[in-house]
Image (cartoon, grey):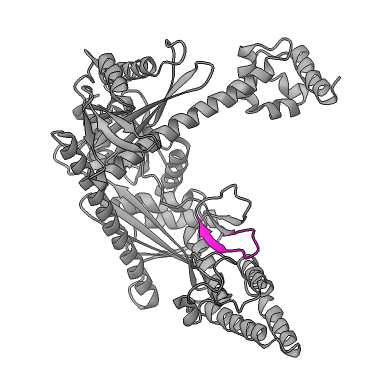
Amino acid sequence: MTKAELYQKACMLPLLPGVYIIRDKADEIIYIGKAKRLRIRVSQYFREGVPHDNKVSQMIAHAFSFDVIVCQSEFEALVLEASQIKAHTPKYNILLKDDKGYSYIKITREAWPRLSFTLQKDDDGAEYIGPYTSSFAAREMAESAMDAFLLPRCSRRFPQDIGKGRPCLNAHIGKCMGVCSGKIRCEDYNQAVKGAVHLIRYGKKDILKTLTRRMEEASERLEFETAALLRDQIAAITKVTEGQKVVVDENLEMDVVALAGTPDSVCAAVLRYRRGRLTDKREFVFHDRSDLDGVREEFLPRYYLDDEEIPKIIAVDALPADADALRQALSEKRGSEVQLYEPQRGDKARLVEMAHTNAVERLARERGRAAREQKLLDELAQVLGLPAAPQRIESYDISNWGDGTSVCGMVVFRDGKPSKADYRRFKMRTVAGTDDYASLAETVSRRAGEYQTRTAAGETTGFAEKPDLLLMDGGRGQVNAAKEALAGTALADVPLYGMVKDNHHRTRAIVDGEGREIAINMNRGTFTFITNIQDETHRFANAYRKQQMRQKSYSSTLVQIPGVGPKLAKALMTQFGSVGAVRAAQPEALAQTPGVGDKLAAEIYAWFRREETGA
């Protein structure tokens, strides 16, 4: 349907509350919204002359049809909208992704263990406390524990660096026990680390009593240095745990929410207060949006009705248009009354202002980061002689192993950042044996074919987007192979270069189809950027190859079972996920796999049992 036809259809809707569902040409749901009066809300999208921000304009451009569900009340529409968005995750509804991952507190296993905050868990034998969903909370706990027990933060290694050089500034100002001075026994240090871990795990409940008892025992043994260290730790714990003032009633739980915007982005900041103290901060940035009221109306129900903990009080910088319905929905989900309001004065109003300041600061950082990335792209365009900065860069790398099997990884950098949703993986279909040139030619040919097919179907995203720059992992040979494969296709005019490595497998230069090398090591920004692209492409391709090798190994184990061929082995792997799960499954469960009947299920079960006993 055309925009005019959609507008005519919208004008026939009732003036009743409900949910509207907008679909594209492929009948995919691209947006779900609610309305107090369906006719007014939906017709605004398709009426000529009504201004919209970038994201909404894109949604309207892709809209082809819509459906509505009429509800009895605005509250019912709000709840239905939340459940439908959760079920379908439409492309143009806001995605609540902040920049947090899981966080951990790490304690190394060595004679003089070190405690630190980390964003990932490595297989290095260390002890990890977590995961924490809030990096803010994890970092605060780690810092507080190190402050309380005067643990070192420096890069010195113990005992190797004990007695070498002067103690650091932290030791001079009483924030570190000064292990490097040589005056701290290993036993006392380890006790301090154990105390810090106890404080992180359990709080200060019993730790002060334990430290006080140990201090008195050390004094009785005339171990005055140990007693002094314990005394300092007791004082530090008391200071740290009382360091953050209670800003609201200590028995009250409250969230503070504020939004800030620029002409092309909106940020929502959430400060979480529990027991009167700030325990977490979350920030969500929505690009291509400028309508603060519209984002607020979408954000609050999405954030709190999608499995988020709902506090007793939510203080906001402005109430959304559906505040009464939202308040009712939040209260029902929590099981008790929720206060959703805009404070006008006093401490809570100042907290809302603080949340707004955090949102403004985050947008400033985003603008600075975007400016740096755009500068890198401009420099790259200048180095390569491109007419404009490449906004979509695609990079390809072939990975193969001994039996002649090859795969290719394609990574995409959009606006200077990895766009992992656009990454793609290719298995070779026509290439026999290990031939990187032929494999690369097949891959880019298929990429060009996908572009032509999808653009002809009216698609505009994914493979339907034309890259501004193509990069091949390799030299002149790889570039020529790709160039020949793209000749005569819609991607033939895309600039294409190779990324050449030196003998130490580090990026050295960029090469064109004529074999001419363009030095990039004199331009640090461009050199680092290209190196990151090459490393990411290599990582992605290798990860896919290893995954295929594991699956192949698993399948080869299953095809050893009489009656199980490659097709059934694949079905079993799909059903159970691993050979270990197939081994552990009972015959009744095995028989549920397509193609596996009761008889073969019993034989598979018996085969694994015979294998275990060696019979």
Q: Nearer the viewer, residue 424 or 163?
A: 163
Q: Is residue 11 left or right of residue 103?
A: left
- Camera sees residue 510: yes
Question: Which image quarter: residue 275?
Answer: bottom right
Q: Is residue 109 magenta?
A: yes
Say whether residue 248 is visible: no
Quadrant of residue 326 within the rendered picture: bottom left
Above or below residue 88? Residue 524 is below
From the top left corner, tell me how far across and down residue 41 is, in percent: 28, 42
Query: In the image, residue 461 lies at what x, y percent?
Result: 30, 29
Q: Which residues are magenta?
A: 107-118
Magenta stretch contains residue 31 = no
Q: Quadrant of the N terminus?
A: top left
The answer to whether residue 248 is above or below residue 357 is below
How far across and how far down the image is residue 188, in percent? 67, 75
Q: Position of residue 451 (x, y in %)?
A: 29, 20
Q: How many marks?
A: 0
Q: Is residue 325 above or below residue 192?
A: above
Relative to the observer, which residue lies in front, 521 or 140?
521
Left or right: where does residue 412 sit relative to residue 8? right
Which image quarter is the C terminus in?
top right
Query: Compared to 541, does 118 lie above or below?
Result: below
608 left or right, relative to 127: right
Q: Residue at x 57, y 58 (%)?
A: 106
The answer to which image quadrant residue 351 occupies is bottom left
Relative depth, front residue between 98 and 195: 195
Task: Pick whichever, 471 or 463, lies toward us.
Answer: 471
Q: Is residue 279 left or right of residue 31?
A: right
User: Which residue is drawn at the image coordinates 43% and 40% (left, top)?
Assistant: 85
